[in-house]
Image (tube, rainbow, N blue to C red):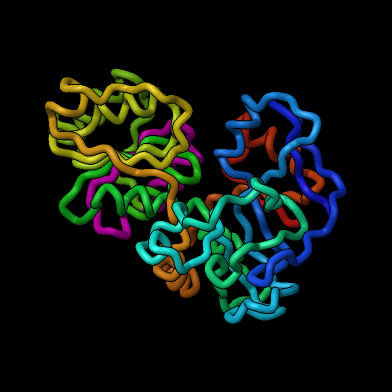
Amino acid sequence: MRATIMYGAGDVRVENVPDPAIQDPTDAIVRIVNSCICGSDLHPYHGMEATTQGSPMGHEFIGVVEETGRDVSTLKRGDFVIAPFAWSDGTCDFCREGLQTSCRHGGFWAGNGIGGAQAEAIRVPFADGTLVKAPVGEDSELLPSLLTLSDVYGTGYHAAIKAGVNARTTVTVIGDGAVGLMAVLSAKQLGAEQIILMGRHKARTDLGIEYGATDVVAERGEAGIERVRELSGGDGTHTVLECVGHRPAYDQALGVIRPGGVISRVGVPQYEDAPIGFGSMFGPNITLTGGPAPVRAYIETLLPGVLDGTVNPGKVFDRTISLNEVPAGYRAMDSREALKVLVRP
């Protein structure tokens, strides 16, 4: 089959690799119907050291079950499924607590011998615990929205949930990428009446307004902080959903958070050191939370709204390509010519 392999910064190739096969009785083989390129894929695209063996890419997919191991009990051949970006057994204590990204026996796609999702097919460990069936066919117009449940919608929702967003909280969302827009949508669903989106790409912020943003702040740095504080009565907002992962976004969050507020980070952090001392967080009683979203815990909550058309998170996909075009898709996202690229193998 064909699959995407990254060999170093900027070096993405689509190559022939061995077909996936059942290895454990809890496995399933899924034929991938749609996958995509994630903003977090751009981090290795910028900084991965050159290797000779390469690394499989992709962690978001929906597809059809082609084969199951003998111990798989909830799935059968032909089922249409949504895959979270982490696989998990569904039975350990962390899974039962809704933290599948910390599953004692789980892991992430494209690592530890598990293939990537920018491919034609994939082996799914712990299929019963990982995959969620959806009552749709391969030709459904809902496929892009269903694909967002694999990562970005659940990640935006996680940001809002961890921050405690509700009708009484004001919200700043930092970042107008797909996760930031999903954070806006999620904050709106949770009842927030003021949602300030910090971003400066009009096509994206226009979609953010459609999803529920009440204000858009294009300025960055101190100018952006000042503008958010003007919009929030001078004190900043109760919550900040940081959906970028770079240090300037963290500093922006500190600048616009209200005393007693919550900063929720879901952008994969590309830094290790940042202010957490008296003047930055301790003194004003700021809470810092977030982390990799256990999207498996949220799929059943978010799926009905997708199926009945109440929400259309699939609008974040603004380009569709074939698997052979994936290297060009990376370039388009890196240059911000595309917001999020959907891949049809």
* Residue 30, position as x, y percentages in the image: 71, 66
Residue 154 in view in this figure: no
Who's the residue at 61% across and 39% down the image? 338
Of the pair 321 and 128, the residue shown nearer to us: 128
Relative side of 269 to 64, left or right: left
Q: Is 200 one of the magenta-colored residues? A: yes
Q: Residue furthest right?
A: 16
Report the front residue among 56 and 37: 56
| Foreground residue among 101 and 312 | 101
Q: Nearer the viewer, residue 44 or 42?
A: 44
Residue 87, horizontal then vertical, whole percent: 56, 58
Q: Quadrant of the C terminus?
A: bottom right
Quadrant of residue 57 within the rendered picture: top right
In the rendered image, the vertical position of residue 177 relative to residue 123, given as above or below = above
Q: In the visual, does 85 lie left or right of 76? A: left
Taking the image as shown, residue 228 lies to the left or right of residue 173, namely: left
Q: Quadrant of the N terminus?
A: bottom right
- Residue 12 horizontal side relative to residue 152, left or right: right
The x, y position of residue 147, in whole percent, is 58, 59
For the record, the magenta segment spans 188-211
Give the residue drawn at x 37%, y 35%.
174
Asked if one can make out residue 158 in the rendered structure from this viewpoint, the answer is: yes
Residue 93: image x %, image y %? Answer: 39, 63
Residue for point 35% across, 63% down: 97
Q: In the rendered structure, does residue 7 fall within the stretch colored magenta?
A: no
Q: At 62% across and 68% down in the image, what residue appears?
A: 141
